[in-house]
Amino acid sequence: MKCSVCGGEVRRAMTDLPFKTSDTSIVIIKDLPVLQCAKCAEYLMEDEVLRWVDEVLAKVESATELEIIRYAA
């Protein structure tokens, strides 16, 4: 698969990504499987991973400032 940004090779990788869920809340998801460009670091998430992320982020309490969650399929 080729990167839509730079044309580089896209490969499966594990990464830690931060998600801002409100003005005062950040959730870091560790060991998230992504498709990442080896050249420019652009990344994509597969549909099932994105659904999991959406479900997890929807459950974060509004008073949370920082939460770290490990990906679990």
Image (cartoon, helix red, strand yellow):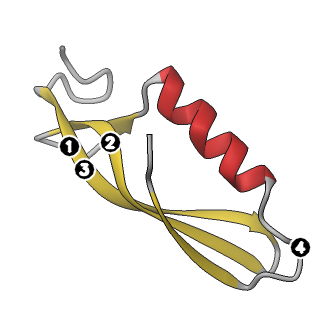
Mark 2 is surrounded, within 10 Å at the Cα level, by few (under 14), some (14 to 19) or many (20 or more) other residues, namely: some
| Circle 1 residue | 13
Please provide percent x and percent y for residue 6. 22, 29
> Whole-Å distance between the Cαs marked 4 and 3?
27 Å
The C terminus, quarter of image: top left
Tell me the element at label 1.
strand
Please provide percent x and percent y for residue 31. 32, 57
Q: Which amino acid does label 2 sit on?
A: Pro
Mark 4 is surrounded, within 10 Å at the Cα level, by few (under 14), some (14 to 19) or many (20 or more) other residues, namely: few
Q: Which residue is drawn at 79% across and 57% down?
A: 59
The N terminus, quarter of image: top left
Q: What residue type is labelled 1?
A: Ala
Q: Which of the numbered marks, if any, corresponds to residue 72? A: none
Tell me the element at label 4.
loop
* Mark found first going from the N terminus, 1 or 2: 1
Pointer 2 with pointer 3, Cβ within 8 A:
yes
| Circle 2 residue | 33
Please provide percent x and percent y for residue 67. 61, 77
Q: Which of the numbered marks, if any, corresponds to residue 14? A: 3
Quarter of the image holding residue 50? top right
- Which of the two residues, 65 or 10, is positioned nearer the viewer here? 65
Q: Is residue 50 left or right of residue 31?
A: right
Quarter of the image holding residue 3? top left
Tell me the element at label 3.
strand
Pointer 1 with pointer 2, Cβ within 8 A:
yes
Mark 3 is surrounded, within 10 Å at the Cα level, by few (under 14), some (14 to 19) or many (20 or more) other residues, namely: few
> Whole-Å distance between the Cαs marked 2 and 3?
5 Å
* Mark found first going from the N terminus, 4 or 2: 2
| Circle 4 residue | 62
Q: What residue type is labelled 4?
A: Ser
Q: What residue type is labelled 3?
A: Met
